[in-house]
Amino acid sequence: MSSVGIVTPKTMHFAEPLTLRSGASIGGYNLVYETYGTLNADRSNAVLICHALNASHHVAGMYEGADGSKNVGWWDNMVGPGKPVDTDRFFVIGVNNLGSCFGSTGPMHVNPATGKPYGADFPVVTVEDWVAAQARLADELGIEQFAAVMGGSLGGMQALSWSMLYPKRLRHCVVIASTPKLSAQNIAFNDVARQAILTDPDFHGGHFYEHGVVPKRGLRVARMVGHITYLSDDSMAEKFGRDLRNGDYQFGYGIDFEIESYLRYQGDKFSEYFDANTYLLITKALDYFDPARECGDDLAKALAPTQAQFLLVSFTTDWRFSPERSREIVQALVRNKRRVSYAEIDAPHGHDAFLLEDPRYMHTVKAYFDRIWNEGGRP
């Protein structure tokens, strides 16, 4: 297996306003995307990859830096020649969502109505809004139907939303480590993270760009809170346990334990590249995703419009989006007599497992995409 190699992002501009679920609209926006592999003659081998919270369009391959460093795509172990999503077979598309800070129009960009960065004035977006924008991109690329739409975590919510909003536009839906809606506990974690940002003195009501500052303290804490939820207790115990950084207690409020050092490192790194307004937007999109809400909390009814075949994967130690939540989706699909494959992987890594290279997980996804290819993904 090899990488797709050096890749270059592309940008597509959309002049027509996109009406959002909130009632607001956004016009004159850009979507940044990348493609890997070759689109076949009848455009039937396209696969859309939807990204999670702090990821982007850069799914696979690498960017060559001026200093010789290489920035590898966040799912490079999954997408590429000979990999589970094989780019020798499939034409894979990664799209950066509206509101992100990795190129697509978001809070950091200029609001044409004011001539200043949107900041807090950027409208709240939902999973369904992202899917609508992705569908417009597919239209421009001439793709009427995807062989599969796939995503993990928040990306899995988007894939599931695709199956309901555009049932005829995908043959397969691959939902990994995801959920039909957040639990109260998950919403609580998101709000604690948002409050850390909102109460940072450098936030300036979301218009910190104009002040030449970044609310790094809030971003650090937000990332630390989020990162805790991505790891399992077993994973943290194995990596760090109660190991002391300097061999003994320091009797102060600095760093005593290795887990503290790790979390602060993650927070510091995150605060250097991620946008605070984007973090607020994306966590709200997570909170608002609940397709059953408009169907009397009946998930089976919400999934009734679907026509795709499904693969769902969960991980035993993922307490953020537990296997029980994936089973809810499976049961609702079975009630609709959909063709569903489900794998529950016994892995120690918590929610982060969907990004890692567990052989059973990789084999499951590869076998499913082999089936897609053999059932009609071929050129």
Image (cartoon, rainbow, N blue to C red):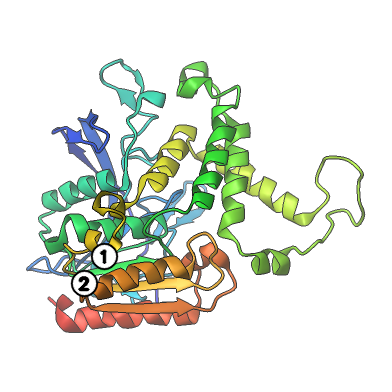
Is residue 347 left or right of 285 when viewed as pictured? right
Q: Label 2 near label 1: C-beta < 8 Å?
A: yes
Vertical comparison of 307 with 294: above or below: below
Secondary structure at badge 2 equals loop
Q: Quadrant of the C terminus?
A: bottom left
Instruction: Assess disc 1: are there few (<14), some (14-19) or many (≥20) residues with their C-alpha within 10 Å of its C-alpha.
Output: some
Is residue 361 left or right of 130 when viewed as pictured? right
Q: Name the residue under label 1.
A: 300
Residue 143 image offset from top left, x and y in percent: 12, 58
Q: Name the residue under label 2.
A: 336
Residue at the outermost front position: 296
Which comes before the other along the chain, label 1 or label 2? Answer: 1
- Nearer to me, 320 or 86: 320
The disc labelled 2 sits on which kind of residue? Answer: Asn
Q: Is residue 6 at least partly visible in the picture? A: no
Residue 304 image offset from top left, x and y in percent: 19, 64
Residue at the outermost left position: 42
- Nearer to me, 71 or 282: 282
**Residue 92, image quadrant:** bottom left
Vertical comparison of 293 with 231: above or below: above
- Nearer to me, 102 or 312: 312
The disc labelled 1 sits on which kind of residue? Answer: Ala
The residue under the point 41% across, 42% down is 282
Vertical comparison of 16 with 114: above or below: below
Instruction: Assess disc 2: are there few (<14), some (14-19) or many (≥20) residues with their C-alpha within 10 Å of its C-alpha.
Output: some
Is residue 146 left or right of 124 when viewed as pictured? left
State the separation of the CA atoms marked 1 and 2: 7 Å
The residue under the point 53% across, 63% down is 352
Residue 55 image offset from top left, x and y in percent: 43, 51
